[in-house]
Amino acid sequence: MSNCVSVVLGQNGWSVTYTKKSICTLKGSTVDLSCSYTYPSWHKVTTTFWFTKKYAVENYVNLRNDPDYKGRVMYHSDKMNGHTLTITDLRESDSATYKFRFITDQTGGKHTGDPGVTLSVTDLQVKVTTTWWSTTLTCSTTCTLTGNPAYTWYRNSKIVQGASSPSYSVYFQTEDSFYCAVKGINSPAVSVEGHSYFHVTYTHQRICTLNGSSVDISCSYTYPSGHTVSETIWYTKGKLNEAPQILSPGYGGRVEYLGNMQSDSILRITDLREEDSAEYKFRFRTDQTTWEPTFPGTTLTVTGLQVKVTPATVTEGQKVTLTCSTTCTLSDNPNATYIWYKNGHVTNQSISLFLNPVSSEDAGRYSCAVEGHEDLPSDEETLTVTCEDV
């Protein structure tokens, strides 16, 4: 499909074809308005110009001579009867209908291209829309910018979202300032300070802890002023079509709620079991509504300790490695020191136990525990050492 959308045909081959019928662009930017024109072959063009003002018959104000455009207008023409008007440092007052006119060396050889090109010049403004759960910032203009340009969002002068849509959402309370930009032209900055809405922030996305231990799963939350929290609820996200499991205080004798019922909450679970591994989420009720976040909560993985023997079958004189293994990295002690027990007595402290060379005296029942959690040892694993054939 051709870009030439506005064609003005005259009698005997007179015409002006505008590349665009309308243009919306930004204050402070530069714009090109282009056209091509035709006329009878026996004419020779002597004058070409663009104008927006006409005061009387044949009294057209050439933009080059218009004081409102002084120093900001350039004309470009080519041998194929193309003509371009360039306006720099655009102002909102430049919004108008621009027409091209040419004059030839023949009597009556004059033609104006109607209806012209409508230019709209707009600035950028950030509009703030607040809901119960977020604040949406929209980079607003009074017309739709030509060419669908990319928008860039800045937070305290640093890019937070580039080459994107005209909207940006904030899900947290902040005193930071935000502004948007298009092709290097910035909007005024705005602050979302003081806007409060429903939101939950989990302290940890993932927690890995020991079978038999206790865990605190915590979050902070916000809500609009005028609301009073009436109930807080922790629950596990159901798998597939399973319903969520509400964890009321005292549930199973292992659940406790802590927090101030105003802005933070802690779910404490004691005597953890591997079946407690799940995604834990928080919701709360106020005197006006119930709010539940749709984004992920805290994923808890409960792991036991297991002694792994490598190789599984050992002959006296070989080397053997005993490793204290977990299914995930412990959150509260990622570089844990492990205590090793042989036949119930402490024998070493290290992540792994290396026996090289192994002897029949090393045979026995081995278990391990994390330092600080000696009351939660692994099951015992028996190391059998076969004597060498003589």
Image (cartoon, grey):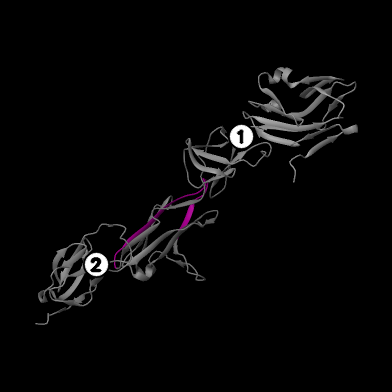
- Left or right: 107, with 4 as reference point: right
Above or below — where is 290 with respect to 241? Answer: above
Q: Residues within 10 Å of mark 1 (few under 14, many from 20)?
A: many
Identify residue type, mark 2: Cys
Q: How many marks?
A: 2
The answer to whether marks 2 and 1 mark residues whose Cβ atoms lie closer than 8 Å is no
Identify residue type, mark 1: Leu
In this orientation, which residue lies closer to the viewer: 126 or 72?
A: 72
Give residue 324's mark. 2
Which residue was labeled with disc 1? 124
Q: Which residues are magenta?
A: 212-233
Whole-percent x, y for residue 250 in the image: 37, 66
- Label 2, label 1: how many angstroms apart (C-alpha)? 61 Å
Within the magenta stretch, is there residue 344? no
In this orientation, which residue lies closer to the viewer: 97 or 15?
A: 15
Looking at the image, which residue is at 33% across and 63% down?
328
